[in-house]
Image (cartoon, rainbow, N blue to C red):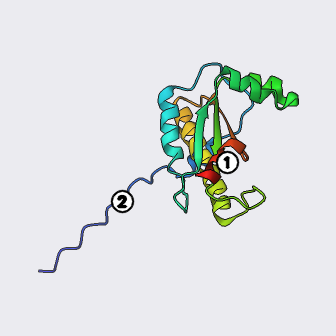
Amino acid sequence: GAPAAPPPPLPPPSPPPPADDMLFARRSVVAYRPEPVPAEAVQRALEAAVLAPNHFLTEPWRFYLAGPEARARLSALNAAKQAAFEKVPGWLVVTLVASDLAPDGSFNTKKGLEDHAACAAAVQNFMLSLAAAGSARRGRRASLWTASLHSVRCEQASAQSG
C-alpha cells in the first residue's frame, strides 16, 4: 500500500509574554503608597541591577539606603522640591565610582562614559525589577525613590587614588 500520510504538525507553543512588558509597565511616579517595598523585592531588584552591562567590568555602581538624616540633608539641597521629596517613603541612592576621569574631573573619557552608562543601566534594571514585583502585587507602585548622582566627589577621589 501507499505510505501513510505524515501526521499534521503540532500547533506552535503559546508565545511567552512580551519581554518588553516591564518597559511599558514601569513609570516615574510622584505619588507613593506609605508602606515600604518588601525587603525581598528590594534585594531582588539589587540583584537585577548588578547584572547591568558594563563593558570594562568595572561595576562602578554603589547603592545606599538613605536613612532619615541623609534624606533630610538631600531634600534640603532643592528647596523647590523639598516638600515632594519628604513624601517619598524610602530612598535608594545610587552613586558612580568612575574608573577613569578626565583631567578636569569629568567622566569625559572612554571608561568614564562607559561607567556612567553602566550605572544608568543598573538603575534601569533596578526599576524594571521593582515594576515586575509591583505588577505581581496587582499594580502596587513601588515606594522607593532612586537618584543617580552624577558627581560624588568623595567617591571620585577614592577612585583616583585607588
Residue type highlighted by circle 2: Pro
The residue that disc 2 covers is 11
Q: Where residue 123 sits: x, y (%)?
A: 62, 45
Mark found first going from the N terminus, 1 or 2: 2
- Circle number at residue 111: none
User: Residue, x 50% and y 44% (percent of image)?
Assistant: 48
Residue lying farthest to the left in this orientation: 1
- Quadrant of the rendered image containing residue 129: top right
The quarter of the picture where the N terminus appears is bottom left
Residue 62 visible, this orientation: yes
Q: 10 Å neighbourhood of mark 2: few (<14), some, or many (≥20)?
A: few
Along the line of sight, the residue nearer the viewer: 103 or 23 = 103
Please say if the residues under marks 1 and 2 sit with CB atoms less than 8 Å apart.
no
Q: Is residue 116 above or below residue 123?
A: below
Q: 10 Å neighbourhood of mark 1: few (<14), some, or many (≥20)?
A: some
Q: Secondary structure at mark 1?
A: helix
Residue lying farthest to the front in this orientation: 161
Residue 88 visible, this orientation: no
Q: Is residue 52 above or below residue 76?
A: below
User: Residue, x 52% and y 25% (percent of image)?
Assistant: 38
Measure how far apart labels 1 and 2 are at the Cα level.
Answer: 60 Å
Q: Where residue 29 sits: x, y (%)?
A: 72, 34
Residue type highlighted by circle 1: Ala
Along the line of sight, the residue nearer the viewer: 115 or 130 = 115
- Circle number at residue 157: 1
User: Residue, x 75% and y 56% (percent of image)?
Assistant: 106
